[in-house]
Image: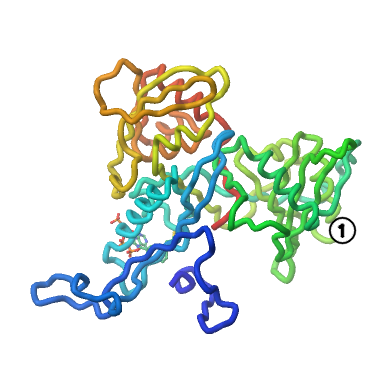
């Protein structure tokens, strides 16, 4: 059903056909009667059908992901492959399925859910909010070719043996970000990714790993070139050294396509103003709060931030009530941790922040402020003291996600 909706060929008889769902994926579906007629009184025959007489009418997969949250981590349900069979579209199954998905995310202890929408509006009605976009830039290689060597740095080819060092650098250098997937677990098996993926590792004179750049050489397409997946370094010098490595392709291609995070530090070292956005659609990333208390507790508080406020989350979306996102929470911040107590909404002397489900998704994913939420027209009201605390807690880079699913 998924390949029918999103493209590709799925031949169950082929020896290469997937034999089931990937480990780490939770499949969910809705069955309907194979011959979905109507009884004389006009009711659907679904209730009367035995399981043998049913067919799959809608399905989705939840990935068990973990994401970075400003130095902390949270369990996240990554939703993919959501599809309603063409025979059953327009019957309201989408909403039924998504409510089931969110209820299952809550059962699994996930703090939030994330997806790449092909139609953001239909997810918005269920409390998802756009928090990030995946951006790629076209960088002319002539500019990179002129970069000077960086003293005290050398590069190593990434092999099976050095791949764990690349993984460790990714985890370390993106730990303070918001939204970046932790590349652990079944979706990120150890070893080289294959399919043309290459990388070099940057080390200093003391043998310390400083960063890496990874890419795939595009061949046989209209516009051959280099797709750079990510360039991560500890400091500016590291990033310059890695950009210089990319400049060495200038003899065979004119530009690279460089995938960047929001506010990527590599933007600060690109040597010319001739970089431009890559053509094509810009994938959006949406999140939805599943468990407000768990999401707040997952984020460490900045050192020196102390205080308490009451957070009220109003969820009036089509998925309200499927997960513990809405409610009144008393939030205490001290010694670098956040503790959250669901409250019975009894009167309190605490200053209050009141958010709708969309503002909650925007702010609790991190890197955005109450003022940003208001600029987007989301409901975000706050007593000044409470608003200042929440903004300080959620401060950090705007969310980014580099792994597509
Ligand atoms: C998109 C899809 C899942 C909708 O399923 P459905 O059961 O037909 O949807 P519903 O009838 O429950 O409608 C849900 C909402 O989506 C809207 N919608 C449905 N299809 C739409 C379309 N093609 N374009 C815009 N809006 C659409 C409906 O108007 C409705 O909005 P409302 O809640 O404001 O009333 C289904 O058409 C499908 O499987 N499409 C192909 C795969 C796909 O696009 N999956 C989503 C990937 S992100």
> x%, y% of residue 200?
81, 51
Q: Measured along the vertical axis of the image, is residue 91 above or below residue 383?
A: below
Name the side, left or right, on which 87 lies relative to 241. left
Q: In which quarter of the image is the N terminus?
A: bottom left
| Quadrant housing the C terminus | bottom right
Q: Which of 263 and 396 is in front in this view?
A: 396
Relative to 221, does residue 137 appear above or below in the rendering? above
Residue 401, horizontal then vertical, whole percent = 57, 47
Out of 168 and 364, give the one closest to the viewer.
Answer: 168
Provide residue 81's location: percent of width, then percent of height: 46, 63
As drawn, the residue found furthest toward the left would be 41
Q: In which quarter of the image is ligand 1?
A: bottom left
Residue appearing at x 35%, y 18% in the figure: 351
118 vs 149, left or right, is: left
Residue 328: x percent and y percent?
Answer: 31, 30
Q: Nearer the viewer, residue 212 or 277?
A: 212
Q: Is mark 1 on a helix, strand or loop?
A: helix
* Disc 1 packing (10 Å; few <14; some 14–19; many ≥20): few
Question: Circle 1 is placed at which residue position?
Answer: 251
Image point (60%, 41%), residue name: 262
- On the rendered structure, is 314 left or right of 258? left
Depicted 74 relative to depicted 90: above or below: above
Outermost residue, bottom side: 13
């Amino acid at each position: 059903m998924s390949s029918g909706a999103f493209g590709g060929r799925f031949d169950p008889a082929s020896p290469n056909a997937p034999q089931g769902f990937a480990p780490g994926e939770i499949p969910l579906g809705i069955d309907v009667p194979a011959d979905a007629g109507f009884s004389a009184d006009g009711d659907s025959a679904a209730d009367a059908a035995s399981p043998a007489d049913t067919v799959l009418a809608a399905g989705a997969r939840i990935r068990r992901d973990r994401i970075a949250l400003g130095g902390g981590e949270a369990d996240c349900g990554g939703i993919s492959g959501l599809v309603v069979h063409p025979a059953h579209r327009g019957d309201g199954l989408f909403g039924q399925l998504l409510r089931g998905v969110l209820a299952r995310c809550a059962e699994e202890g996930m703090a939030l859910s994330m997806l790449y929408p092909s139609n953001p509006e239909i997810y918005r009605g269920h409390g998802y909010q756009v928090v990030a976009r995946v951006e790629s830039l076209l960088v002319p290689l002539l500019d990179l070719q002129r970069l000077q060597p960086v003293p005290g740095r050398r590069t190593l080819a990434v092999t099976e043996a050095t791949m764990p060092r690349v993984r460790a650098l990714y985890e370390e250098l993106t730990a303070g970000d918001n939204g970046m997937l932790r590349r652990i677990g079944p979706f990120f098996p150890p070893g080289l990714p294959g399919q043309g993926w290459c990388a070099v590792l940057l080390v200093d004179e003391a043998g310390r790993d400083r960063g890496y750049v990874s890419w795939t050489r595009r061949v046989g397409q209209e516009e051959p070139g280099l797709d750079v997946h990510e360039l991560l370094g500890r400091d500016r010098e590291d990033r310059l050294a890695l950009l210089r490595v990319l400049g060495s392709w200038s003899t065979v291609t004119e530009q690279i396509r460089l995938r960047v995070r929001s506010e990527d530090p590599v933007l600060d070292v690109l040597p010319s103003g001739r970089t431009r956005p890559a053509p094509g659609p810009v994938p959006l990333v949406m999140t939805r709060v599943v468990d407000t208390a768990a999401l707040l507790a997952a984020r460490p508080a900045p050192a020196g931030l102390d205080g308490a406020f009451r957070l009220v989350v109003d969820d009036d979306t089509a998925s309200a009530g499927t997960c513990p996102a809405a409610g009144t929470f008393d939030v205490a911040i001290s010694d670098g941790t956040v503790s959250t107590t669901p409250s019975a909404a009894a009167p309190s002397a605490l200053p209050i922040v009141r958010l709708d489900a969309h503002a909650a998704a925007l702010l609790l994913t991190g890197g955005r402020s109450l003022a940003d939420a208001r600029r987007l027209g989301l409901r975000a009201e706050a007593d000044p003291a409470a608003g200042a605390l929440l903004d300080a807690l959620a401060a950090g880079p705007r969310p980014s996600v580099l792994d597509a699913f």
